[in-house]
């Protein structure tokens, strides 16, 4: 079984141009679009733009973090995929938050509420089971969860967004790794998301390797795609900036403050002796 995996922190569906001067209070409050010679900064609903980029990308499973909860069903539909959503923090009064986010996404920011959303393309098979692990219950530090998805083929996919500070983030990752292997029961597992931990700064990746997970590809990255009981065919690599940009009025809108990462894996076949 070969699997192409994508992981992307969606920044709550907002854009993030490379020019800091485009972030202005008049844009944030009055929703006035700012521009320079190359980029726009818009304060509006960018669902179609995100959905277009994700739908056109090559992947079998997509692990999305900071995904607006209201996007789960339409995004799955746009990508011809099944969805597994695990809510994270700030999701009380969800319908009201969603209305405010549509009116002014930049002003409400992360207060719209968030989720970890796993999408599985139908070619890979159906979702057989959905589980959720609460890594940190919240509210301080804020609630963190892991979506654990089991496919009918046996492949398991774990999607998480760890806390922003250590040692909390490393503790969550250790707990996630251990639970993944427990729930997988020997089946191949992909563990990915926004770990908020750089391999050169934490020993948690050594702990995960001792559990059987692959090593991270970039010592300075915080977004990762690891696997257990699978062969790494293509180590996780970030997209170039242009890959997450869309054009409007001849200028670029850069989606999210994170670049997507992609990796390729293959399930290990049982060994047979002649």
Image (cartoon, helix red, strand yellow):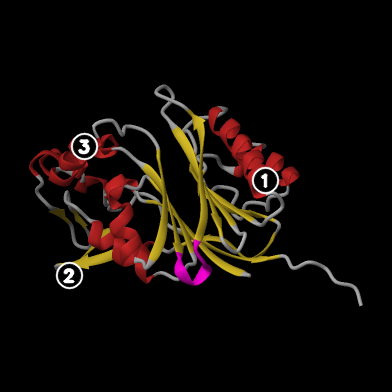
Point out the tag, 1 or 3, that comes first from the N-terminus. 3
Q: Tell me the residue that label 2 is attached to.
A: 250
Packing grade of label 1 (10 A; few <14, some 14-19, many >=20) is: some
Task: Find out whether the residues at labels 2 and 3 contact each other: C-beta distance under 8 Å.
Answer: no
The magenta stretch spans residue 106: no
Q: Residues within 10 Å of mark 2 (few under 14, many from 20)?
A: few
The span picked out in magenta is 121-126
Residue 217 to residue 251: above or below: above
Q: Disc number at residue 221?
A: none
For marks 2 and 3, give the CA distance: 32 Å
Q: Residue at x 57, y 27 (%)?
A: 167
Circles 1 and 3: CB atoms closer than 8 Å:
no
Mark linked to residue 181: 1
| Quadrant of the snapshot with the C terminus | bottom right
Q: Is residue 232 above or below residue 210?
A: below
Task: Return the residue at label 3.
Answer: 97
Task: Name the one closer to the observer, 262 or 198.
Answer: 262
57 lies left or right of 189: left
- Number of residue marks: 3
Residue 201: x and y in percent read: 60, 37
Q: Is residue 72 visible?
A: yes
Q: Position of residue 50 (x, y in %)?
A: 30, 60
Pinpoint residue 84: horizontal percent, then vertical percent.
43, 51
- Dot 3 falls on a residue whose secondary structure is helix
Q: Is residue 242 visible?
A: no
Q: Report the side of 49 relative to 59 (left or right).
A: left
Mark 1: secondary structure: helix
**Residue 257 vs residue 118: left or right?**
left
Identify the residue shown where x is 71% and y is 57%: 229
Mark closer to the observer (2, 3): 3
Work out how far the residue at label 2 is from the one at label 1, CA to CA, in angstroms: 48 Å
């Amino acid at each position: 079984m070969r699997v192409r995996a994508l992981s992307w922190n969606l920044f709550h569906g907002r854009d993030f141009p490379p020019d800091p001067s485009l972030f202005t209070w008049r844009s944030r409050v009055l929703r006035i679009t700012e521009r320079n010679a190359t980029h726009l900064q818009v304060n509006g609903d960018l669902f179609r733009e995100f959905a277009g980029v994700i739908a056109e990308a090559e992947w079998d499973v997509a692990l999305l973090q900071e995904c607006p909860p209201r996007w789960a069903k339409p995004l799955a539909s746009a990508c011809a995929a099944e969805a597994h959503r695990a809510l994270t923090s700030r999701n009380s009064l969800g319908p009201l938050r969603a209305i405010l986010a549509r009116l002014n996404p930049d002003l409400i920011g992360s207060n719209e509420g968030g989720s970890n959303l796993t999408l599985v393309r139908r070619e890979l098979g159906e979702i057989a089971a959905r589980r959720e692990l609460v890594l940190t219950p919240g509210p301080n530090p804020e609630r963190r969860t892991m979506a654990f998805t089991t496919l009918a083929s046996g492949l398991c996919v774990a999607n998480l967004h760890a806390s922003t500070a250590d040692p909390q983030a490393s503790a969550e990752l250790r707990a996630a790794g251990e639970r993944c292997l427990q729930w997988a029961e020997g089946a191949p597992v992909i563990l990915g998301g926004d770990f908020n931990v750089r391999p050169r700064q934490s020993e948690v990746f050594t702990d995960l390797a001792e559990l059987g997970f692959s090593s991270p590809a970039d010592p300075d990255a915080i977004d990762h795609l690891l696997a257990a009981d699978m062969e790494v065919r293509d180590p996780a690599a970030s997209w170039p900036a242009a890959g997450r940009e869309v054009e409007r009025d001849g200028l670029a809108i850069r989606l999210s403050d994170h670049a997507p990462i992609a990796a390729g894996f293959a399930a290990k076949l049982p060994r047979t002796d002649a």
